[in-house]
Amino acid sequence: MHDSWIEKGQEVFLQNYKPLPIVIERGVGNYIFDKEGNKYLDFVAGIATNALGYSYEPLKKAMKDQIDKITHCSNLYYNEPSIRAAQKLVELSGLSKVFFCNSGAEANEAALKLGKRYINKYIGENKTEIVTMKNSFHGRTIATVSITGQTKYHEGFAPLFQGITYTPFNDEEALGKILTEKTAILMIEPIQGEGGIRPAEKVFLQKARTLCDALDIVLIFDEVQCGIGRTGTVFAYEQYDVKPDIVTLAKGLGAGYVIGAIIANEKTAKGFEPGTHASTFGGNPLSTTAAGVVLDALVHEGLLEHVKTMGSYLETCLMELKKRHTSIIDVRGMGLMMAIEMDDPVGDIIAKALKKGLMLINSGTHIIRFVPPLTIKQTEIDEMIQILEDVLSSK
Ligand SMILES: *Cc1c(COP(=O)(O)O)cnc(C)c1O
């Protein structure tokens, strides 16, 4: 049965993905079941997205209720769920104004447009350059793929969006040299996600803030992956004592429902006026209902504390695992955004783990990342470690 669906999938989809050969049917708790009834412990969470697992009743109830009312009405009118969600984001971020869209790439596009328009209107039109990090990842649209500092994502898409330079992550000296009066925007992931789960150093982000202030540069943090509780605080930047001008969000914000957002400070928010940017589906009452539930769970249901506790437990377990397996050369990350770097490519380990009922995801060729639902339990971390141990021992 599985095989015939997989064959059909290969027939009807563009070949830009290479899925593992299972067909997902449903989720329960922090587990996923395929169409043949096989059960998998989920340490992928739809790529750091399904923040509340699959049995979070307040989410299901809120979504069902909202479906019975209305799911979409456009931005020609107000709707209450989006106002509530935006209000929460403003309160939690210490920033000022929200724009909702539908994905991480769209959030980054919106941030680039807002940053550019603010600079052009209020600072000066000779500031045109954009600086991002080597090894970064910001999305797959032409502009966001262009600002992504990894050539493998550029291949075949020339000419790219212009005026971008990439600087080494965590290198303050290089940053000091590359930022000039001509720079309009600096974009950084506080923890590089697709680039191998690499946290920024505090001094680096602080230097970035200082330089951006001195040179009138818009500082954008891409928290599409590391934001919304993933690291144990709502925003990763809270742990760095640095505030961006604009932060971008998506993945975990909707707990599996389609949403992206940017939050801008008062200063840069002026860059948009009626008619300058839009998204038909953005801020629809269904996806923003999900965001409201997620933010409540983090702050009022103790989920942030849970992430901190489980994050440090996961880190300890991975450190122990590293002691037993010399093939693991590094353990790093923050909260429930952890990784192990291996001495060999990890594709084989991920395939074997799946056969043993564990979903894992890579980040680059040699790195396995651990981005489970934020609701993951200690016993489930133990179970994951046991399966991973079996796979590593059978190599
Ligand atoms: C996933 C990701 C994106 C792109 O998000 P999409 O929803 O796939 O467009 C952008 N930035 C970061 C840091 C991401 O992890």
Image: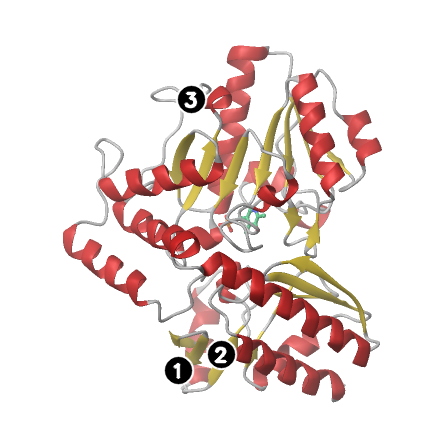
Estimate the x, y position of residue 274 in percent, counting from the top left. Answer: 34, 21
Q: Is mark 2 within 8 Å of ligand 1?
A: no
Toward the viewer: 99 or 2? Answer: 99
Horizontal side, residue 217 vs residue 270: left or right: right
Disc 1 marks a residue whose amino acid type is Lys
Name the disc covering residue 272, or none: 3
Number of residue marks: 3
**Foreground disc of the pair 3, 1:** 3
Mark 2 lies on a secondary structure that is loop
Estimate the x, y position of residue 207 in percent, counting from the top left. Answer: 74, 31
The residue wearing badge 2 is 22
- First in sequence, mark 2 or 1: give its number: 2
Horizontal side, residue 92 vs residue 245: left or right: left
Estimate the x, y position of residue 180 in percent, counting from the top left. Answer: 74, 19
> In which quarter of the view is residue 116 placed?
top right
Disc 2 marks a residue whose amino acid type is Ile
| Residue found 48% across the figure and 53% down from its top | 251
Tags 2 and 1 touching, CB below 8 Å = yes
- First in sequence, mark 3 or 1: give its number: 1
C-alpha separation, residue under disc 3 versus residue under disc 2: 44 Å
Instruction: Mark yes or no: residue 153 visible.
Output: yes
Toward the viewer: 348 or 304? Answer: 304
| Residue found 29% across the figure and 50% down from its top | 289
Q: Does the residue labelled 1 lie within 8 Å of ligand 1?
A: no
The residue wearing badge 1 is 35
Name the disc covering residue 257, or none: none
Instruction: Mark yes or no: residue 183 visible.
Output: no
Disc 3 marks a residue whose amino acid type is Phe
Q: In the rendered view, would you say 159 is above or below 376?
A: above
